[in-house]
Image (tube, rainbow, N blue to C red):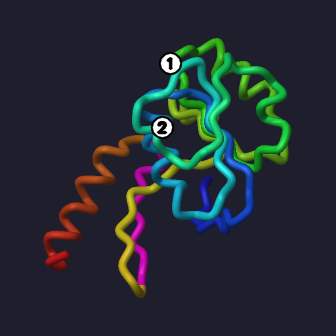
Amino acid sequence: MSYPILLQLTDKNVTIIGGGKIATRKARGLLTTGAHITVVAPTFTEDLQQMPVHRIQANYQAQHLRKAFLIFCCTNDPVVNAQIIQDASPCQLINDCTDKSRSDFFNMATLKQEDHLIAISTNGDNPTRAKEILQKIRQSAGI
């Protein structure tokens, strides 16, 4: 059973394994949090190359997780993703973007305004549906 929270990520280490579209989206969402973001991949999207993140151009190694508080598995290789899960310590939180059953947390669709934040979750089942619901809220509120 899940429990919704907001995490304070200022000065926390976040590691994203993968350099594609999903990794880019995760990194973009983390940029304003104050986290120290490291992205590990053999190649990076053009957007990731432009972001103010630490990039390690390499294949995944267990050492890449050493300092991570949050870990995002964003590769399209199930063997690598399974290895990341195995290598992580119990005190590290993992989001396997390819298999929610191996995730400690899920991202939510969010609408942030100056004085409030609205978050919608489908418990990782249907992120597209969460975005649709959020869009309806935006339209109803005229935002």
Quarter occupied by residue 109: bottom left
Tell me where the magenta segment starts and ends, as one range. 116-124
Quarter occupied by residue 42: top right
Residue carrying label 2: 48
Vertical comparison of 78 with 19: above or below: above
Residues 38 and 25: in front is: 38
Vertical comparison of 4 with 62: above or below: below
Residues 14 and 84: in front is: 14
What residue lies at 42% left-to-right and 66% top-to-bottom? 119
Task: Name the amino acid type tagged 2.
Answer: Leu
What residue lies at 39% left-to-right and 84% top-to-bottom? 114
Residue 91 position in % (x across, y down): 84, 47
Rounded to the nearest angstrom, the CA distance separating label 2 from label 1 is 17 Å
Disc 1 element? loop
Give the number of the disc on residue 76.
1
Residue 90 position in % (x across, y down): 84, 42
Task: Name the amino acid type tagged 1.
Answer: Asn
| 22 within the magenta span | no
